[in-house]
Amino acid sequence: MKVLMVRTPPTKRPGTVRFGTKAETLVAVRERAETFTVLPIVRIEHDDWTRDRSGCVDRILEHLDLGRSLIVRSSFSSEDGNGFSYAGRYRSVLNVRSRLELDQAIESVFSSYETSTTTEHLFIQPMATDVVLSGVIMTADPQTGAPYTIINYATGADTEIVTRGSGITKTHVLFAKAKERLPYILSPLKACLIELEELFSGIPIDVEFAITEHGKVVVFQVRPIAQQPDCSLSDVDGFEGVLDQVSTSYRNLVRHFERKQIGASIFGVMTDWNPAELIGLKPRPLAYSLYRSLVTDGAWSEGRARLGYHDMHPHGLMSLIGGIPYVNVSLSFHSLVPGAVPPLLRHAIVRDACDNLSRNPHNHDKVEFAVIPTAFKPALCRTEWRDRFPSLVDQEWDDYKQALLTLTNDIIKDGAYGRVTRQIESVERIYLDRVDLASADFLEVKNLLARIRQVAMPLFSSTARAAFIATDILKCSVEEGLLPATYIDTLSIMSNCVGSQMVEDFETLAAGPFLERYGHIRPGTFEITVPRYDAAASTYFGDGAGRTKATETRNSRLSGSDVSHLNSMFRALGYAFDWNCFESFAIKAIHDRERVKFLYSKALSDALEIIGNIGARHGFGRETMSFLTVSDIENIVDLVPDPRSRISELESANRAAWHRFLPVRLPELLLNENDIYSFDVRDASPNFITDKTLQGEIAETTDSDLTGRVVFIERADPGFDWLFTRPVAGFVTKYGGENSHMAIRAREFNVPAVIGAGKSFDDWKRGKMLRIECGAKRVEVLW
């Protein structure tokens, strides 16, 4: 009988550990480990087990004491190989406390193996005790191969929370050479990580571990990372140079804004204008430069200033740090303070709001609702909002609230918003203009973008801000018990947005007229590589079978007594408008925002088509053209008589720069320079739309059959409205806030959705069947 027992490890022997089966690798690691522990191991061969089960159990109990719980673990030959890990495919049995349980557990594990088990084995260990934290370490990014140490962990005695995918987990990302930056709770891992790198000669590995209450590290499993991709920057020293460049870029930005007396050191990907949602975390140069040129260089602030907010339009809101589009949080906060607030008070408000966000980073995608007020709302009368601005004396707080009240009344009652929206006709003219997309040149692109930038985007900024004000007051009124919880959904339906009109037209119009009206829409408004509706109609709409209709409560209204109560509350708050006035404003603002977005996206989509067609005329595909920037295109118009060679040069240089920073990982909220090398992946607070419960199979937008399924969309923008012509059960997005486009659409069609799932998005997506309870704000992976 072959029973392998390693009780006391010998003195560490030099040399690289070679991977074998799970048990063989652990035995080799145990023989060499000095800074961590591998618990004693007994290995049982299947042939021995089939010949003499009782004898195997006897020999196990000679080495392991049943006074301490045991674990029987699989060690099949196909597990933990270089190609596939097969993690969780074979059974392990925990908490074995008796001879009978041990016999049954061994049989159970062997029975989970594939048919040919003659030469296979399993192993038994004591259960770890006094565990306070456990998890999984990957010593390289499994997506890119970059030299990051990624630690997914959970606190408590249960060592299976992370691997089982249940319970609350946290993730820390660490540049491999920056182990001194480990947070205190994970600091016992430092020596262990260094030793494991030596034992495996830097080969990327996946490690299951625990930390005991005495600070001792226990290693349960070591295996190569399955299907690790190639990465040109996987060299630690080379990648350190890239991160140092990112660090320098960050410091330069901070110094620049400090000289401008904006005091910026915090940057977010979802804090304002949601670049992560609209152009992604690693946008190509064309998408990034379009968004920056059209939106975040000036129009973002100009539209707010028209409504009475502080004008920050000379400053660009968005910067590229490590290839990731970040919004300057301080700059954003300055632009959300009423223009009537004196400068010294405004700076104090912004400092307090930044401090609040630093302490509560989970609010990074909902700052208007939880960090800095942008309108006067009922909740401002409560002490929790007062406490968020500790540097303000009571009179300054009162002055701030009064400025918000005056601004809110001016926008809703006194006509500021009405004056702004008179320009919608100008945007409609842009939509109605027709361009010969096949023959147009870069000069036409330049003209189209100029009209969007000068006319459409400032108006969109105003309508978006007005819709935020409406939603903020509505949401607060629900929280205060002034409105039923479902009323925001009802009002979204009453707004009769573009999405519902598109679905109605899809049901009644022939394909030609439908695509004439909506064919310009593309999922990825700023991304040239994504086809428009009219370029891939069958992909988006299938055979036209099955539609998602808007709910039938379109004309729902509050009762007379409800309205009377709201009017009394509005008067008490100092509002100069009654409920009917506010409701009309809210419906119009939500409608206008979606209408303007629909109108300007036509010109933008046409510009992208022209760029694609110009590329085709010169022998370039759309991917090549996606690496040009707006500045490149404008320079070609002005300076280059023969664009072909220039396009090739620019694409090559821009692609190399983009690719260099592609493996860089940074947090969604960048608080300081240390975050470039070591940061927590912060938990998102998803937004649950409707109060429905659904259960369905998980699908992606590329799947042919979406009937009754939960569709996962990493970043959702207006181009994904085609989903509502399909009978989907619901959907989940990785990015997006409660007031984002797809949240509005979900309310409009009464479709349950989880918006802004954050890091949970990838965890849920790995499942097959999902249950979403929107009312309970709960998601469960069923299998």
Image (spheres, grey):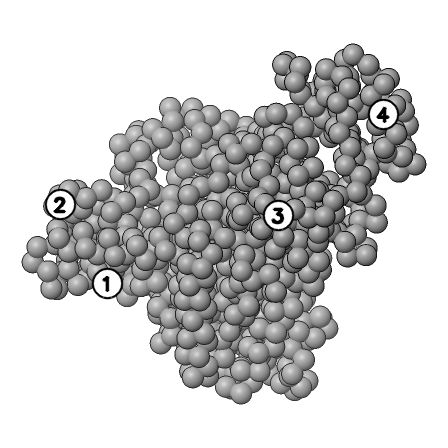
Q: Residue at x 72, y 48 (%)?
A: 11
Report helix, strand or loop for mark 2. loop
Sort mark 1 into few (<14), some (14-19) or many (20+) by Cα contacts within 10 Å. some
Q: Which residue is drawn at 36% across and 56% down?
A: 660
Q: Position of residue 270 (x, y in %)?
A: 50, 59
Alpha-carbon span between mark 2 and mark 4? 76 Å
Question: Is residue 370 among the parts visible in the rendering?
Answer: no
Q: Which residue is drawn at 58% across and 50% down?
A: 197
- Amino acid carrying label 2: it is His
Closer to the chain start, of discs 2 and 4, is 4
Task: Tell me the number on the disc at residue 618.
Answer: 2
Alpha-carbon span between mark 3 and mark 2? 59 Å
Residue named by callout 4: 59
> On the picture, is 242 further left or further right than 551?
left
Q: Residue furthest top?
A: 51
Residue named by callout 3: 14
